[in-house]
Amino acid sequence: MKISVLGSTGSVGTQTLEVVEFNSHIEVFSLIANTNWQKVYEQCQKYRPQMVGMFDEKAAKELKTKLKGTNIKVLAGIEGIIECCCHEEVDTVLSAIVGKAGLLPTYHAILNKKNIALANKETLVIAGHIITEVVKENNVKLIPVDSEHSAIFQCLQGQNSEIEKIILTASGGPFRGKKIHQLENVTIGETLNHPNWSMGKKISIDSATLINKGLEAIEAKWLFDVSLEKIQITIHPQSIIHSAVQFIDGNIIAHLSPPDMRYAVEYALNYPNRRPSKLPRLNLFNQNLTFEEPDFDTFKGLGLSLECGKRGGSAPIILNASNEVCVESFLEGKISFLQIPEIIEKTISLHRFVEKPNLQEILDIDQWAREKTKELIY
């Protein structure tokens, strides 16, 4: 099997390449990244892809110079990225790039009959109604890679019973148990210090605000065709149970593994088969598994996200775009941690709702939300 890794320098992308190392039947056909050409160059030396795509034109130029004399083709910009994903030799696209940037490459890959291993939740958050439709039309597989959604997907295998409830677990992030007055002056470093997972900056901050869990609930709505009312978010600090499904007879099936994204990646790339894995095994002895209700008063972004998901249409697009800008501004020291949900809520209140936006409208609404959020910040 030949794969295209969309977002090869990020946390999930690099872990995907680790998985490839002990799955000899998987070949890396193309690597795709944004600006970090130095890391891509190192990956090229190790994995020898046939193609590389860089979103950034300057980074592509630097990489092309560095790879001179090799047979690796270097492409740039969105057109080059799409070509890397849609090449006839690619079987599966591992979509792991952060944010809205994953939408168009994933969409075009589906149109070109590529199976998708999806770690880019934003693609479904902002365009779930479009993506799920083209997946059906093109008869391709859409396998979730987020650990929670992989867990739900695995719990549903072989089941033909109606879902009563999806139990979507969350660690609670670095500020679990804190009250809102204790978060007024938290630092960037404290916010990035996730207790269980090693992730990129964007998702680490989303996990701290719990907005990430709201985005995951919206993603689950589209992946598993359930209403948000049937998704229960549960704080599980140990991150051992990655999610669970309760059926209409009251039985619950849960998925357990260590907090390591490679389990979900390996499952997605090998699906529907399971192969012997070199990943470490979970030791159930001395495990103390606990569960708590979310604190919606302190983590206002969670409730806001769920409201947007329930409203649907253009609301999740505004939520996602505004959040991306706010996270970037927080990392730049321009706003405080508690201002993130406040600015998102203000942006949402100013937008003109669209019931069922098409692809171009999604891109336009996204751009509007980014510009409006920046206006509110500056």
Image (cartoon, rainbow, N blue to C red):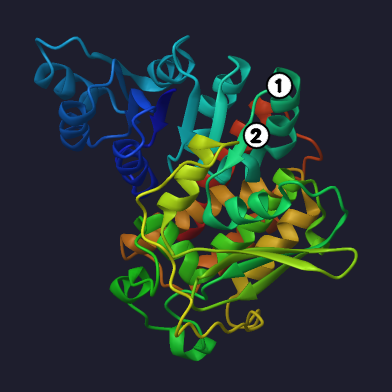
Residue 111 appears left or right of 97: right
> What residue sits right under mark 1 in the picture?
139
Quarter of the rendering containing residue 195: bottom left
What residue is shown at x 9% (from left), y 10% (from top)? 69
118 and 343: which one is in front?
Answer: 118
Q: Residue at x 49, y 15 (%)?
A: 86
What's the residue type where badge 2 is placed?
Answer: Ile
Q: Are marks 1 and 2 in contact (CB under 8 Å)?
A: no
Of badges 1 and 2, nearer the viewer stands: 1
Residue 287 left/right relative to 43: right
The quarter in which the N terminus is drawn is top left
Sequence-wise first label, 1 or 2: 1
| Viewer can see residue 119 | no
Image: 107 above or below 375: above
Residue 307, image x, y percentages: 74, 62
Q: Which mark is residue 362?
A: 2
Q: What element does badge 2 sit on?
A: helix
Three-letter amino acid code of the residue under disc 1: Asn
Which residue is depicted at the point 43% across and 14% down? Answer: 83
